[in-house]
Image: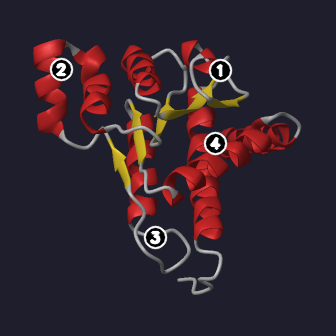
Amino acid sequence: MIESITRTIDEKILLLEKLKDCQYLQQISNAINAMVDSLKHGNKIILAGNGGSAADAQHFAGELMGRFMKERAALPAISLCVDPSVTTCIGNDYGYEKIFERQIAGIGQEGDCFIAISTSGNSENLVRAVEAAKGKQIITIGLLGKDGGILKNLCDYVLVVPSDETPRIQEIHTFTVHVMCEGIENEIFKNNLENR
């Protein structure tokens, strides 16, 4: 058992080292800048994902609406995964592939940022949501894995974790959420030095 755990830790370390040698860090920086600009102009961050990626979307929204490291004002963010009445209504009436697209149509506004979180980059409901977002002049960010899938060529900003292992991709996505939240807080609240 210890050997298996050690192997998993070693895989994570290798993957983190790999991130420093690819475009991932620059893409994180670019995405943070896009979100900061959107928020400074009075827009919001919208997030969505399926399964574990839905949990990441909720986590991200919670850290922005609540706080991450600083005691500061709330930032407007919403996960499209959290309302079962809405998702089941849309799923029942239109199909599961439209659960996020329909919500983007309802609440998305020009200048918002939509973050699609997908380990494969091929989830149809996220592909449709990104297409709907682009139609409304919403900035799109793909937090992806493997080869980036369909979303890699659709999103304005693309962060592809260089791994084929879903658990490792999800772990890096959570790490990325924390890096982004810290970056957003630091940029928007530069003069607020009070940390929790």
Kindly identify the amino acid type of the residue bearing the numbered disc 4: Ile
Label 1 and label 4: CA atoms lie apart by: 12 Å
- Image x and y of residue 188, in percent: 59, 67
Q: Give the residue at mark 2.
A: 91
Circle nearer the viewer, 2 or 4: 2
Q: Is residue 10 visible?
A: no
Kindly identify the amino acid type of the residue bearing the numbered disc 2: Gly
Reply above or below: 71 against 188.
Answer: below
- Image x and y of residue 50, in percent: 38, 29
Mark sitting earlier along the chain (1/4): 1
Image colouring: secondary structure
Q: Which mark is residue 172?
A: 4
> Label 2: how many residues lie within 10 Å, few (<14), some (14-19) or many (20+)?
some
Kindly identify the amino acid type of the residue bearing the numbered disc 3: Arg
In this rendering, position of residue 19 left or right of residue 101: right
The quarter holding residue 157 reads top right
Mark sitting earlier along the chain (2/4): 2
- Foreground pick, 103 / 25: 103
Q: Secondary structure at mark 2?
A: helix
Label 2 and label 4: CA atoms lie apart by: 30 Å
Mark sitting earlier along the chain (4/3): 3
> Label 1: how many residues lie within 10 Å, few (<14), some (14-19) or many (20+)?
some
Label 1 and label 3: CA atoms lie apart by: 31 Å
Reply above or below: 68 against 53.
Answer: below
Marks 2/4 in contact by CB < 8 Å: the verdict is: no
- Image x and y of residue 97, in percent: 30, 15
